[in-house]
Image (cartoon, rainbow, N blue to C red):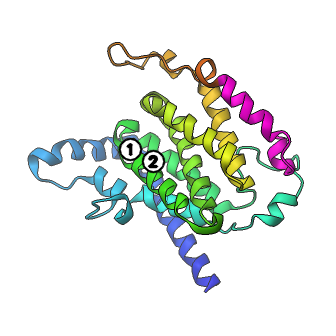
Amino acid sequence: AAEDDEEARTASLSSLEVMASLVDVADVRKKIVLTSKLAATTGSADLLRLMLLGPSATSPSDQNGVVRCCAELIINGVDDDVDSWRVDPPSLQSDAATSWEEDDAAIYAESLLESFLRNLGGGTATLPVVLPLVEALMNSAAGAANGSGWRQYRAALSILERCLDAAPVTFAPHVPVAVEAALNLASNNPCERVQLQALQLLGALCNADTVEDDPAYSPPTNATPIQVRAVYGGRILQVASALVASPCAKVSSH
């Protein structure tokens, strides 16, 4: 069964890699976006929707497009350990940006997801697909028994960071919700792997800070500027300071 799972992961990653390579080509990318714009009036196939959602998708639970496939690999990967990870000391070779350590499948799926977010119509087209999926992951994790939903929480936080990196301007209105989710999980979730991912997202949000400084950003009329450090800095520092005392060295040193 383990060998079958590994073969399935490899096949899924290979398929996603091919599609990511295709949408990385400018002419192909333009063709996909154009067919999406024409689909409503011509009745032709909407390639963008097909790639993002899969055929006949009506809700996040039945999507099987590239976003969902990447998310499944990020959730499951090959790394399901908590106890050994908790006591294993951090090393200079560890990637501080992820709690996946050597889980190459999940790490690669993250990079592929970011590629799709950047190339398939930008955040305007992709975030309406990704964010409901993130919400579904959060709800699934919250309803899991005995803390077994930690992988869904970790994946949701990581996907939010990928959204921020790939489409910061479009993601700007969602920053307050992302900050609150990360603060809540960093403070209240007992799983160190979730805490680390929440800290990572908070750090990325602080680095992005005022995304409306981007010349391409056109805020709605009378929109309140989003300033992560100015608005949330005190609370973020309070949460981070508390986690400095974490018995998990990977969390306390992050």
Residue on which the image places disc 2: 116
Amino acid found under the numbered disc labelled 2: Phe
Residue on which the image places disc 1: 126
Q: Quadrant of the N terminus?
A: bottom right
- Counting from the top left corner in percent of width and height, residue 129 is at 37, 49
In front of the other: 179 or 5: 179
State the mark number for residue 27. none
Of the residues under marks 1 and 2, which one precedes in the sequence?
A: 2
In the image: residue 137, left or right of residue 125: right
Q: Residue at x 34, y 41 (%)?
A: 125
Amino acid found under the numbered disc labelled 1: Thr
Judged from this view, the residue extending furthest toward the top is: 222
Above-or-below relation of 224 to 66: above
Q: Secondary structure at mark 1?
A: helix
Specify start and end residues of the magenta stretch as a single range: 233-254
- Counting from the top left corner in percent of width and height, residue 25 is at 42, 45
* Figure label count: 2
